[in-house]
Image (spheres, coloured by chain):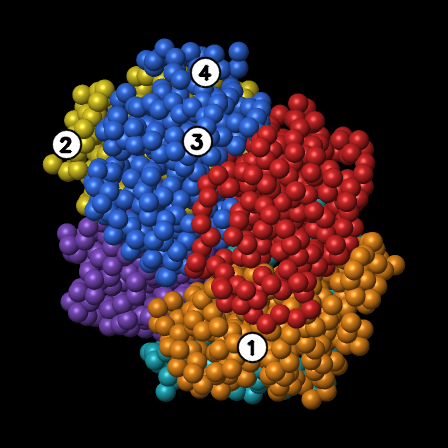
Chain colours: A cyan, B purple, C yellow, D blue, E red, F orange
Amino acid sequence: MRILLVNGNTSDEVTQTLARAACDAASPDTEIVPVTGTFGVRLIENRAEAAIAEHAVLELIAEHAEAVDGVLIGVSIDTALRAARGMVDIPVVGMTEAAMLTACMLGGRFGLITFSASSTAPYRELVESYGLMDRLAGMRTIDVSFVEAFEGRDAITAPILASANALIDEDGVETLVLVGAAGAGLAAQLQSRVAVPLLDGITCGVLLVEALIKLGAPPPTRGSYAAPAGNQVTGLSETLTKRLKEYGE
Amino acid sequence: MRILLVNGNTSDEVTQTLARAACDAASPDTEIVPVTGTFGVRLIENRAEAAIAEHAVLELIAEHAEAVDGVLIGVSIDTALRAARGMVDIPVVGMTEAAMLTACMLGGRFGLITFSASSTAPYRELVESYGLMDRLAGMRTIDVSFVEAFEGRDAITAPILASANALIDEDGVETLVLVGAAGAGLAAQLQSRVAVPLLDGITCGVLLVEALIKLGAPPPTRGSYAAPAGNQVTGLSETLTKRLKEYGE
Amino acid sequence: MRILLVNGNTSDEVTQTLARAACDAASPDTEIVPVTGTFGVRLIENRAEAAIAEHAVLELIAEHAEAVDGVLIGVSIDTALRAARGMVDIPVVGMTEAAMLTACMLGGRFGLITFSASSTAPYRELVESYGLMDRLAGMRTIDVSFVEAFEGRDAITAPILASANALIDEDGVETLVLVGAAGAGLAAQLQSRVAVPLLDGITCGVLLVEALIKLGAPPPTRGSYAAPAGNQVTGLSETLTKRLKEYGE
Amino acid sequence: MRILLVNGNTSDEVTQTLARAACDAASPDTEIVPVTGTFGVRLIENRAEAAIAEHAVLELIAEHAEAVDGVLIGVSIDTALRAARGMVDIPVVGMTEAAMLTACMLGGRFGLITFSASSTAPYRELVESYGLMDRLAGMRTIDVSFVEAFEGRDAITAPILASANALIDEDGVETLVLVGAAGAGLAAQLQSRVAVPLLDGITCGVLLVEALIKLGAPPPTRGSYAAPAGNQVTGLSETLTKRLKEYGE
Amino acid sequence: MRILLVNGNTSDEVTQTLARAACDAASPDTEIVPVTGTFGVRLIENRAEAAIAEHAVLELIAEHAEAVDGVLIGVSIDTALRAARGMVDIPVVGMTEAAMLTACMLGGRFGLITFSASSTAPYRELVESYGLMDRLAGMRTIDVSFVEAFEGRDAITAPILASANALIDEDGVETLVLVGAAGAGLAAQLQSRVAVPLLDGITCGVLLVEALIKLGAPPPTRGSYAAPAGNQVTGLSETLTKRLKEYGE
Amino acid sequence: MRILLVNGNTSDEVTQTLARAACDAASPDTEIVPVTGTFGVRLIENRAEAAIAEHAVLELIAEHAEAVDGVLIGVSIDTALRAARGMVDIPVVGMTEAAMLTACMLGGRFGLITFSASSTAPYRELVESYGLMDRLAGMRTIDVSFVEAFEGRDAITAPILASANALIDEDGVETLVLVGAAGAGLAAQLQSRVAVPLLDGITCGVLLVEALIKLGAPPPTRGSYAAPAGNQVTGLSETLTKRLKEYGE
């Protein structure tokens, strides 16, 4: 099976890191198809940039969906997850959603380790939007920018471990999610030094997309994720225009 | 004072309807500046179209923010509300948010009357995202498309009144919000036939943006709505690029 | 327009402080009509005193409602807010409710800075009763009595700023409400030293009552805020007796 | 032991009905001391009347507390419950609180049968204020006024049974509370015709006040229920003035 | 009346301690019938041991229910509470449930003091399962095993008092529950050194079972606690087999 | 890989049905190892029987865990799920948990179709215990016993489809879970007649256990799922005794 790995940022090196982690997690017969945003910012750091990336992610999915069996959104805020589910007929999973649902199956309440102090509120809103606040035991944020977190993995090892221990000792978390591109690969490296399972979104995401592809649930024909009637479209890419125009045909 | 009224759809006739309702609600010395989306769909009907409109709304605000004192987002799903608040230093209010907060001040739990069955889930998610589920007593959806609701106001009067009565009788709502562009103006016309206050987002939105402009709260310098450091930008409009690049300068 | 500013305490100097802040916030054509409780305690400090003030507030509103266009309850626990809404046909807003709803429109979760350690639980119950717990990020209490807080503004500046910073750093609040009469006027003075918007209830309350008066929503004829049938009344003031007896006539 | 039974209404016949039910429930060595409000309305029907009764209930408790071992508030909305707990050193229980907590001990989620359509929202707010919404499975309101419910018990038997069955069939309630003075005594009469336990607040309240008196927990010296410092008092009864003035002495 | 006191552990000395506390709390005419688990572990320390004890508790109740008027489950995690309620026609109360509901009647939010760090999550799940999270202000765990807590009461006095003060100062609890067998008797001894009511489950449990026996609510004939049709049973004790086989006969 | 499929009932024909569905869902290289309860009831119908099955399920897992790589609990109420996770070092998933988490990944809120009216409350409690109430849009129960549901699949097809449509039309569910052994296999057969994805727990459970086995998260060494110190054991099977005694060695 083929899984589209969507990086909504414009940065190829992030895509490559995500792709490596995805390939490590994938089954032998799974092919990872990594793609990078063509407009927007290099690394999403705030609410406005994330909103613009919603559009960029949909463009990428519109362009590539026909050639794959499932989609993994490789942006830590799960950009455009619901919109994509309503646009294509194949499974779409968000990397942070995947890690949190996996944590649920390991038992107990989970903790999140995130980067960039200004991202705390948006991640909390993400957990709320999934209806998972009752499972969230705590969050710790390491206050380096996403760029620093991504580029300086050695420098963030110590604060990650300190955050992990604080979440276990003070908040009683029973599993941990290392959020974001910085976590891809790093979680596995640090697992032996953490007392509870340490999850990253790309690994969990690949496994869950594979499971959903095997499940083969049909797309809904009712509700907010069903394909609606087509619409008049202005100023979008050819493939995205085609998708929005031809809904329901 | 000047209020930017942002229609994230590409349809000028919707903008004009919204603008008329906004002018009716505004103080004599308030000028309404209506603008229309330049890309996307004619009338947002689903999740993908709403996600694309996030980008379109930010483009409009980036282009016009310097010439106004506050922004009212005139899309019923309050498209890009949080993103816009993080991007500009003036008050930004969403039309449906405004109606729901006004309902809170009138007392008790409110009800929503919406259009298009496929929009029920997204509106519920909107209420959840505002932390207002405890104030929502019920929702009724009139299953005509947004286009039909907007264009056929006479045809929807009877179902609106039926929904209003059902919400009062069965769900115990104490105020009502008539959601969307179709509600602009219509709420006032139907008020005399409804036993509880019937609110529309544009009227409430104009009044609350005016209040926030008078309040004059400074933009935060901390948190998820503070201006972050600038970023590398690709493929966006000149004004939007300028805003994202120059953050924090 | 004329706004009744109700102080449920028996202390005239508090009324005067509230009135000054209200006049500063009001539009040029708005007249503030301040009134003071005629029975009860000098400054409400506990649950029993607050319960008695419910009666005192209703007496004041019954006496003055006909001469004004809206009511602002100038007691930090929003004493008798719901009862007043059910008793008169004009808008009634509570000062703390107003600040919290304004905070909602500025974005993110808010924090409360309160006075008197024994008031923490009642304020939390107030937020719960408004269905706004999901928007409350934290509360800090400065343990001086309300009298000390009101009379010794200089002495409380440092602990207010310390609380503000703790709420921003540790709880991630994105706006702050300085609760109570002590906050009236003080919020504006301290704003420049706080990294997020710092709101006070009187300023927000005046702006929102003005907005509701402009809105002109009719009183409900159904539900718990509708005027019920009259009742047999014993031992109340003449105006309050008249109101309760004549309900629904 | 002696239990003060407080009727916050001014109606003696209601007091007598409540007292009869209380005596039926009480242990042989328990004396019920029934008292009636001296000001306010005959039967509380709305929010304003309930707010005034807060004061009336506190007057009664201030007058009689020294001669009893515990207090049962015999008003269905549990008027002044928290305020009374903060004012006296003996146990205070509300009749509807008592029935709901008893329902919790019988297992599963409970349902409420109430009177007067305009009371639905206030009762819901009461359940919320106790943090018991997760245990509330449903509410049905019989739309007769409290006066009619109290005076016309035969006429309300059929609608009570219909409501009970609807709550069991449609909402899955596993216990039922017949709210208010009308329920006192009536619950026992109708129990044999209802498939789940049917509770009334006076019976449950007497049993739980007795249990708390036996428990003998000391009054707190910290928190919102601890006796605060005394206050300057104006215009209240002698005994109530004494209590508020002498707090903490 | 006779109350069955069920210890789901296999340790007789725990049973004796619980029984002493129960006799101290009981009315003169109440007889406490203490029983001890016949299989499982000496002191339940984890989730698996608690699950096995569900079976052991049901065996004990099946064996003794006919000779008593009510049941108090004397295991701090309220083992098999719901199952027992569905199996017998007499009142069944859990010791920790009883303490928490009693705390509700004393007012405000409560705190829990527990033993064994690994029990924090299960106790939190217990509170959630009762729908009482809104009433829980905080939890502190003293990290000694249940055996150590039970056998070394002197050694745990200081940490209990420290936890109590932390819960009052930092979390604003207004009542405290000392959870588990270690708390039986100890709460009364330490009460004079704690600023808010300090409850233990056995004392509260005995008082509430007595109240429910006096109430005499009939067993439900509908819902999840009603006796279902009998079932085919394999490999259980004679009395338990009889009960499950004869359901509904 | 080898997956233990645990039927906590004593009925072999149920085990065989579950096993067939599990084999259909499993990857070619996955072996399903089905086992049946050795004591308890034929088909769990109530709370007491479910509590006893907790013990039976743990016996089966203790006996077979060493020979498999993961466990799927094939009882619709996910009997002993948390207890098993704390007892063994391999992944353990519950069939209904699996279906609900899969529904989360398909988007929107889900609905449950269950059997036996008396099971409605326990299933609701299950969803609450997973912290997933915000994702539950509705539940419909077909009032036949589990035996009838299991044995008479043809007879339940029409009510299942009616329930499915009601959940979609009235409650706005976007995915559906057909709960229980009756659903195994049946969901796939009925999918083409239902407008949204129709999930069954065995299919989802096998796919998610496979994913967790591939993930290879280590067992926690801290928290409520970590292996505790050993305990004194009485009257349990040899393998279960060994496990509880040797914890932590």
Residue sitting at x 60%, y 51%: E65
Q: CA distance from mark 2 to mark 1?
A: 63 Å
* Residue A222 shows up from this direction: no
Residue D16 visible in image: yes
Look at mark 3 in the image and give the residue it sits on.
Answer: D26
Q: Quadrant of the N terminus of chain C?
A: top left
Q: Amino acid at mark 4?
A: Glu
Helix, strand, or loop for circle 3? loop
Relative to D96, A214 lies left or right: right
Query: In whole angstroms, how far apart are the C-alphas of marks 1 and 4?
Result: 63 Å
Q: Which residue is mark 4?
A: D66
Residue occupied by mark 2? C246
Helix, strand or loop status at disc 2:
helix
| Chain designation of label 1 | F
**F170 left or right of E86 in image:** left
Number of numbered discs: 4
Q: Is residue D29 left or right of residue F55?
A: left
In the displayed structure, would residue E77 be above or below residue B145? above
At horizontal 58% and vertical 64% (from top left) the residue drawn is: E244
Q: Residue at x 43, y 80 (%)?
A: F156
Residue A74 % position (x, y): 61, 71
Q: Position of residue C212 (x, y in %)?
A: 27, 41
